[in-house]
Amino acid sequence: MDRLQFEVPVRIAPAPGLPVEEIYSVEQALDVLHEWPKKRQGKVYEAAFNACFGATVDVVKTEDACRAFMAFCRVSGLLARDMMITAKRGGGEARGLRI
C-alpha cells in the first residue's frame, strides 16, 4: 500500500446533483484543496492543507492528514452524507459515527 493512501477513502459531494467522489490519498486531497476558492479558505482549510503537505514530506502521519482533510470537508459542506467516521474508544474498539 502506498504510504500516502488513506485507510478509508473520504467521500465528498462537490455540489448538489454531482456524483459523490472518493478521495483515496493525500495527493488527491491536495488536488481538492488546491482547487478550493481563495475567498473561502480559512483556518480549517489551512490546517488540512498543512497536514496533507506535511504527510508528503513525512512530518505528519497519513491518517492524521486524512482526519484533517475530513474535518475540512465536513466544515465546508463537502463531506458526503453517507460518509462514516470511525472513532476509537479507550479499549481500542472502533465505533461508527454518522455525520
Image: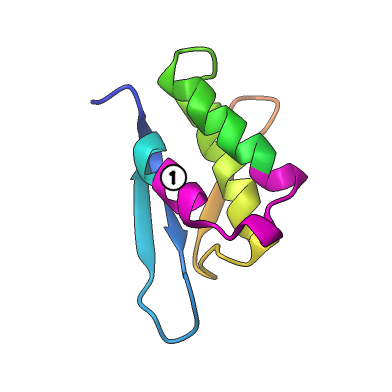
Residue 71: percent from left, percent from top: 64, 48
Tell whether 5 sits left or right of 47.
left
Which residue is depicted at the point 47% across and 22% down? 55
| Of the pair 24 and 91, the residue shown nearer to us | 24
Image: magenta residue range = 30-45
Which residue is depicted at the point 60% across and 30% down? 50
Q: Is mark 1 on a helix, strand or loop?
A: helix
How many marks the image carries: the answer is 1
Tell whether 75 sits left or right of 27.
right
Vertically, is 25 above or below 53? below
| Of the pair 1 and 98, the residue shown nearer to us | 1
Name the image quarter holding residue 77.
Answer: bottom right
Residue 17: percent from left, percent from top: 42, 87
* Three-letter code, disc 1: Ala
| Of the pair 91 and 39, the residue shown nearer to us | 39
Q: Mark 1 points at which residue?
A: 29
| Of the pair 38 and 79, the residue shown nearer to us | 38
Rendering colour mode: rainbow
